[in-house]
Image (tube, rainbow, N blue to C red):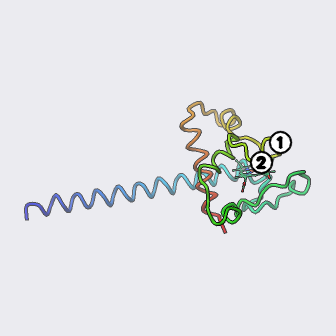
Amino acid sequence: MGRLLPAILFAFALVAFAIGCANEKKQGIAEGEEWFKSYCTPCHGENGDGQSQIAGMMETPPKNLRQIAQRRNGQFPDAEISKIIAGVENVPGHSTTDMPAWWDTFKKAEGITDEKILQEKIDHITAYLKTIQE
Ligand code: HEC
């Protein structure tokens, strides 16, 4: 009986921790969505499907971001997508494209100097994109 209480408390702590993690993840995705709406929809469209006002005027059409996984055999490559957004990954076509590199833009526009935080913000956008895959 003496061991039951600590076990119960431990179980509660675990559950609280899991809920905390889930909340943090949810907040990250919500923030990613906000950033997406601020920075990405002009080209990629309100819902990310690539249908935007200016899409038709662009030489390289913005990609449908709801089909990132579809274009890769159903796999959503988190790290690669974060790199594409940051502009680090030299994906074929990307060095010369109309897809901007966001690393420096976010640094200036959001006034973020801590690169770890900057990476987190980009990962949040990636996490949001993952939720809108078809
Ligand atoms: C000025 C227009 C423009 C804006 C704004 C823009 N993009 Fe793009 N994006 C493009 C274009 C054009 C492509 C396609 C590039 C190519 O095909 O080489 C692209 C491609 C991508 C890809 C690659 C998709 C894949 O399957 O390989 C991702 C991911 C992406 N954009 C994310 C974003 C995010 C996130 C934002 C906002 C932070 C954003 N884009 C803002 C024009 C834009």
The image quarter in which residue 130 lies: bottom right
Q: In the rendering, at what x and y percent does residue 101 appear?
A: 73, 40
Kindly identify which residue carries mark 2.
Answer: 92
Horizontal and vertical percent for residue 49? 75, 63
Disc 2 within 8 angstroms of ligand 1 (CB): yes
Left or right of residue 18, residue 44 in this image? right
Looking at the rendered structure, the number of numbered marks drawn on it comes to 2
- Taking the spot 61% from the left edge, 45% from the top edge, the residue there is 122
* Residue 53: mark: none
Judged by depth in the image, the label closer to the viewer, 1 or 2, is: 2
Cα separation, mark 1 vs mark 2, equals: 9 Å
**Which residue reaches farthest top?**
113
What is the secondary structure assignment of the residue under circle 2? loop
Q: In this view, does 96 lie to the left or right of 6?
A: right
Q: How crowded is mark 2: few (under 14 residues within 10 Å), some or many (20 or more)?
A: few
Label 1 crowd bin: few (<14), some (14–19), many (20+), radius 10 Å? few
Label 1 near ligand 1 (CB < 8 Å): no
How far across and how far down the image is residue 133, in percent? 65, 65
> In the image, is residue 67 above or below residue 42?
below
Q: Name the residue under label 1.
A: 96
Query: Residue 31 versus residue 18: which sits nearer the camera?
Result: 18
User: Residue sitting at 60 percent across and 62 percent down?
Assistant: 131
Farthest-out residue, left: 2
Quadrant in the picture for the C terminus: bottom right
User: Which quadrant is the N terminus positioned in?
Assistant: bottom left
Three-letter amino acid code of the residue under disc 1: Thr
Kind of residue indicated by mark 2: Pro
